[in-house]
Image (cartoon, grey):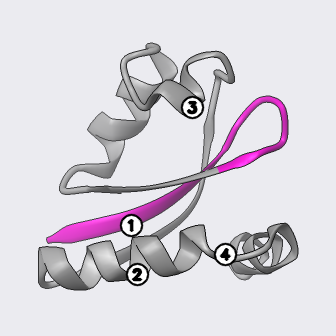
Amino acid sequence: MHYVYVLECTDGSFYTGYTTDVERRVREHDAGEGAKYTRGRTPVELRHTESYESKSAAMSREYEIKQFSRVEKERLVADE
């Protein structure tokens, strides 16, 4: 499976990413080994995940979420 996830950083900002292993990826972000964006914003909290059969579908959705406004991202994570 392929996953799109949304993290909330300690500063309240959101980070959206793609992975095949959500738990491992969150651990990497918390350890400062994830994306450059999250390195200074730990700890992070997993707020939203979506699963897809194909990598291309997941990456398309990741791109779509990254284009969301803050309000749209807040609405997405509130639905959890």
Mark 4 and mark 1 residues within 8 Å of each other at the beta carbon: no
Q: What is the secondary structure assignment of the residue under circle 3?
A: helix
For the point 69% across and 77% down, which residue is it? 68
Could you tell me how far apart the alpha carbons at marks 3 and 1 are, in whole angstroms? 16 Å
List the residue tagged with mark 4: 80
**Nearest to viewer (mark 2 / mark 1):** 2
Q: Which residue is mark 3?
A: 37
Spatial separation of the CA atoms under disc 3 and disc 2: 19 Å
Circle nearer the N terminus (3, 1) = 1
Give the alpha-carbon distance from disc 4 to disc 3, as whole Å.
Answer: 24 Å
- Residue 28: horizontal and vertical position, in percent? 36, 25
Vertical comparison of 41 with 70: above or below: above
CA distance separating discs 4 and 1: 14 Å
Camera-side residue of 61 and 67: 67
Give the distance between the C-alpha atoms of the residues marked 4 and 2, in whole angstroms: 17 Å
Q: Nearer the viewer, mark 4 or mark 3?
A: 3
Magenta run includes residue 50: no
Q: Three-letter amino acid code at disc 4?
A: Glu
Q: Which of pointers 4 and 2 lies earlier in the amino acid sequence?
A: 2
| Label of residue 61 in the image | 2
For disc 1, the marked residue is: 4
Secondary element at image label 2: helix
- Across and down, in percent, residue 62 comes to 42, 71
Which residues are drawn in magenta?
Answer: 1-14
Would you place residue 78 above or below residue 15 in this image?
A: below
